[in-house]
Amino acid sequence: MKNFLYILPPALLAVQSFDSLLGGYFSYIRAAILLLIVFAFYVKFTFEIDAVGRAILLFLAYTLLISFKSSDYSVTIPGYLSILVSMSFYLVAYNSVESFDDFIRFKAFFFCIPLIFIITLITYTGFGIGEAVYDSYEGIRTGEGLHHNTIYTGVLIIVLSFVLFQYSSNKSRDLLFILSMTIIIFLSLRRTAIILVIASSMTYLFMANKKQALKYFIPSIMLIILAYPIYEQPLNSAIEARSSRLSFEKKYDNESRYLEIQTITRRILTFDDINYSLFGIEYLNSFGTYSTMEFPVLPTRILHTDYAVVLHGAGIIGIISYASIILLLILKSLQYARRFGFDDPISIFIFCSLLILVLVTFSGSILNITFRTTFFILLGSVMRLAQQRLEETT
């Protein structure tokens, strides 16, 4: 199982990146394999579980119960299973990674995952497959694989590099690949992804040893600047195409994600329907169920933010259950950082991971099995290491 964890994230990303070119069948095969692995883990293995793992199981159990209230199982059940799979890999990783040497093996991601980003870019842009970013004239093409929140996987690799880059056996190669992937993330103009990169980098600079951090960042920034002539044209083309969405004159309260958060929160907290407020309605099947006079939406639009998905579909009990996972992660990370220092590599990774989880909760990623599985594999691994180290010093 341990070796499988090192193969799974790049395999998931590769399938999602190129499956549209191969007929779309591999996504179903991938889903079936992942379900079998998760079910086998729960049924056949005796496993250790921490407070975060118990909170995850509680959330999964509760949302399973309310899923049976859905009016369309063909929508709700596949969605639930994707969440079950991705979050379960926290427990799988927690019971597989046994030492920091095991965690160091994730440094292989520095090469293989950026390589998938690069090959995807070359394939789709080089052959003109699919639409360019925001229909820009000369923007990059990334197909379905690196579109939307799947590109967050690249952010995880950047955060991982903050901790493990010093263990790389080929620093020049890995730095080049990581920076190439970073440029692709910026060329995608996915605002949340860009915010995650910047916020994670600032967190790292704030927490880490400044000499070590600058030793990593200064060459990175210089290389990105030097490479600007290579990506100048597609970047400018994409910015021009998305100028209305990037404009500072655009009011934040007109953003659909902000409006759905505001609308769902207001409706839940009115308690006009106590059953809806407590338990929600149509978990993961929000089509046409939340439109209001103030926020009219098409019946084909689903909720986009994880916060709204959980609050609307699972009610106050559901959002408290989900928030308890984040709260327990915060408490555990503070306990660890106070013992070993905020500049400890494990502390840095946990806090950056927490930042990512909180930000994507208000952006949207809960159904993305590629990003979420990678996230929970890395989180479960590092939380096991943190727990082991705490136990060794007590």
Image: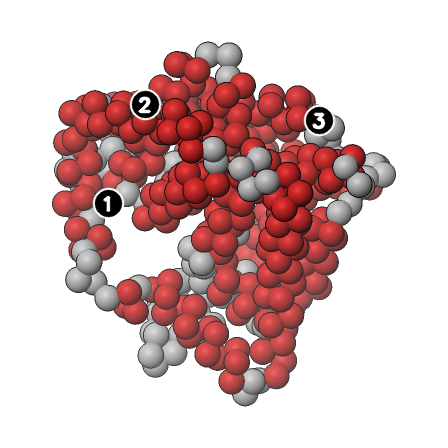
How packed is label 1: few (under 14 Cα within 10 Å), some, or many (20 or more)? Answer: some
- Mark 3 and mark 2: Cα distance apart in space: 31 Å
Between circles 3 and 2, the one closer to the viewer is 2
Q: Which residue is mark 3?
A: 99
Q: Quadrant of residue 214?
A: top left
Q: Is residue 129 at all visible to an observer of this figure?
A: no
x then y, percent, for residue 248: 19, 58
Element type at mark 2: helix
How packed is label 3: few (under 14 Cα within 10 Å), some, or many (20 or more)? Answer: some
Q: Label for residue 244? A: none
Q: Earlier in the sequence, mark 1 or mark 2?
A: 1
Going 46% across and 12% down the picture, which residue do you hit?
170
Residue 341 appears left or right of 386: left
The reply to whether discs 3 and 1 touch (Cβ–Cβ < 8 Å) is no
Q: Which residue is mark 1?
A: 134
Q: Quadrant of residue 336?
A: top right
The reply to whether discs 3 and 2 touch (Cβ–Cβ < 8 Å) is no
Amino acid found under the numbered disc labelled 2: Pro
Element type at mark 3: loop
- Identify whether 50 is placed above or below 340: below
Amino acid found under the numbered disc labelled 1: Tyr
- Viewer-proximal residue, 179 or 40? 179
x then y, percent, for residue 84: 65, 48
Q: Earlier in the sequence, mark 3 or mark 2?
A: 3
Element type at mark 1: helix
- Viewer-proximal residue, 143 or 324? 324
Going 45% across and 53% down the picture, which residue do you hit?
359
Q: Which residue is mark 2?
A: 219
Residue at far top of view: 170
x then y, percent, for residue 169: 51, 12
Residue 10 appears left or right of 241: right
- Mark 1 and mark 2: Cα distance apart in space: 31 Å
